[in-house]
Image (cartoon, helix red, strand yellow):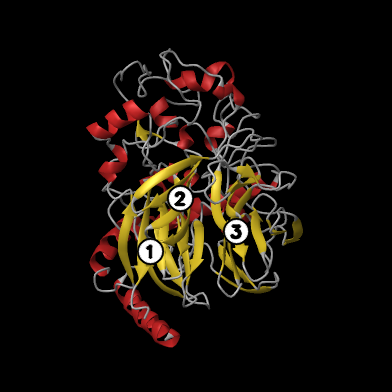
Amino acid sequence: MNKLINLYFLLALTSAIIAVPNKLTAQDTIASNKGEMAEMSFVRWVSQFPSTQKEQTQKGLFERIGKFVFGKKPTVLIKPVAVFAHNPEMFWVVDQKTTSLALINQQKGSSLKLKSTNEEGVSALVDICELPGKGLLITDSRLNKIFLVPPGNKEATIFNNSLSLQQPTGIAYAKERDEIWVLETKAHRIAVLNSKGRLLKTIGSRGNAPGEFNFPTHIWIDRKGQVYIVDSMNFRVQIFNSEGKWISMFGQAGDGSGYFARPKGIATDSHGNIYVADALFHTVQIFNKEGQLLYFFGSQGRDKGQFWMPLGIFIDDKDYIYVTDSFNSRVQIFQLINNG
Amino acid sequence: MKLKLYKPFYIISFSILFTGCFNGYGQQVNNPHKFSADNWEFTEWCNPCHVHGSKTDTSPEGFLLSYESDSITSTDSTYISGISKLCYTCHDGIAATISHSNELSQLKLKGGHNITNAHPVSVFYPTKKRGTIKLHNPNTTLSGLGGTIAEDMLKNGRVECTSCHDPHFSMQTTPCSSCPTINSNQNADNESVSLLKTIKNGILCLTCHDL
């Protein structure tokens, strides 16, 4: 089945090379994608939260009355940056602007403001992952802390307050080894923690050689334990095994298809294809395991399937793709189709 | 045809720019916009914003990674566009954090305008009084940088990040020799982040705001 899917992608890639202009300018991608998406549909748009832009920006009379009477604010996303999902009906969104974690359940949301008793200064929430049995971990690049939100708990705490990190950003849980991998963007390295938050080791240092980093920002660990790092200012993706040994890398700076301008969130689907959101292209580019571009979707805009500076990306077990469309203040959900 | 006519001009211009960046950046150690280690090739230092990555595309438009859209009227400050988008795609709290100086945070504008969080960008400079916001005429008021506000600070009539900041500016050493606004600017504030003019006593703010 994997071979079939890869063949399908390669055929599509051939079509894309013929049909899609090489340079990913806003005008080009808007024009090309609108025409091409219907024919080359590897990714299907499923839904978004909030369901409409109107819902996001305009409050109805009853909602305003409800807010006045009960003082309850509806869940509104302003700058969503990261998602963790079980399925399209239930997922969590980290909102950097409101410093909150929103639980979206059946298109209804409830927010938890992330403030702990020992929090100081200004927050900048970045990424989220699940620590099985203990809750959700959320990085804060300004406070240099990780928040822990226990299941069902309405209060966030600092995860191992003695832990010293330099601008923690991307975070992922390595199930195979029961480890937490956190990127320290300012230190240009990976910090590997045990499940209690104790630092086990660091990987990498500043540089542009294999295994070195220049502002790493996003991380994904697939179901086999393979680790994917967005090495943002080296404009590449680096792949490591579960022990932290470097395996391969791909990507370079550029303004054409398959290049990176502002690579952000990264994730893999069940076939091992690699998805990278690019905030300056307003697209999600899909690569195979060898780093060859297979397809991209999205363009600059506010319509369904378009993005305005996408940041985080998450793919669940059924290949639903969640993208935080940061300046459109929404999460869009897609699905990889023909995945058997 | 247009590209062919201007190609030599662009090549020469970019060569001068790169050389200038090299000379200027070569002296810099602590510029926050130097995205590479000290021993790297100078082209890598400029790569995040100035890049020719598409091997088949050598057109000058591909040089600066700035994306515009004709389909969107950027009067809404929630939709960052133009040159500011280049800034915001790093200053998103992830690759780089956004911070303003304490002096800006403490600044109180007449009329109670709150700019402690962020000054709006990608917005057209109002030519008429809007609410309690009173601004100088950009076409006739001198910026203090050599020309008028419109000439020196606005980008296509809009206020962008680069209206007040120059990312090439070094905080602690000699400014980039290829940056004309900085080199001719006697009001540059070496202690603030890349500001074109000092923010002390509200000098930068008062360039545009008529209080």
Disc number for residue A23: 1
Judge depth for marks 2 and 3 and give the one in front: 3
> Could you confirm whether marks 2 and 3 are on the same chain?
yes
Please provide percent x and percent y for residue B125.
Answer: 35, 28
**SS class, disc 1:** loop
- Please name the residue shown 66% across and 35% down the image: A118
> Could you confirm whether marks 3 and 1 are on the same chain?
yes
- Residue neighbourhood size for the residue with mark 2, other residues' Cα within 10 Å, grouped as few (<14), some (14–19), many (≥20): many
Classify the position of the N terminus of chain A by image quarter.
Answer: bottom left
Precedes in sequence: disc 1 or disc 2: 1
Chain name for mark 3: A
Please provide percent x and percent y for residue A200.
Answer: 76, 60
- Toward the viewer: B200 or B157? B200
**SS class, disc 3:** loop
Badge 1 amino acid: Lys
Precedes in sequence: disc 3 or disc 1: 1
Residue A280 visible within the image: no
Badge 3 amino acid: Gly
Is residue A322 left or right of A38 when viewed as pictured? Answer: right
Distance from the alpha carbon under mark 2 to that under mark 3: 19 Å
Residue B51 visible within the image: yes
- Residue neighbourhood size for the residue with mark 3, other residues' Cα within 10 Å, grouped as few (<14), some (14–19), many (≥20): few
> Could you confirm whether marks 1 and 2 are on the same chain?
yes
Image position of A130 with respect to A244: above or below: above
**SS class, disc 2:** strand
**Residue under numbered circle 3:** A133
- Please name the residue shown 67% across and 63% down the image: A179
**Residue under numbered circle 2:** A93
Badge 2 amino acid: Val
Is residue A91 left or right of A65 when viewed as pictured? Answer: right
Whether pointer 3 and pointer 1 mark residues with C-beta atoms closer than 8 Å, the reply is no
Distance from the alpha carbon under mark 1 to that under mark 2: 32 Å
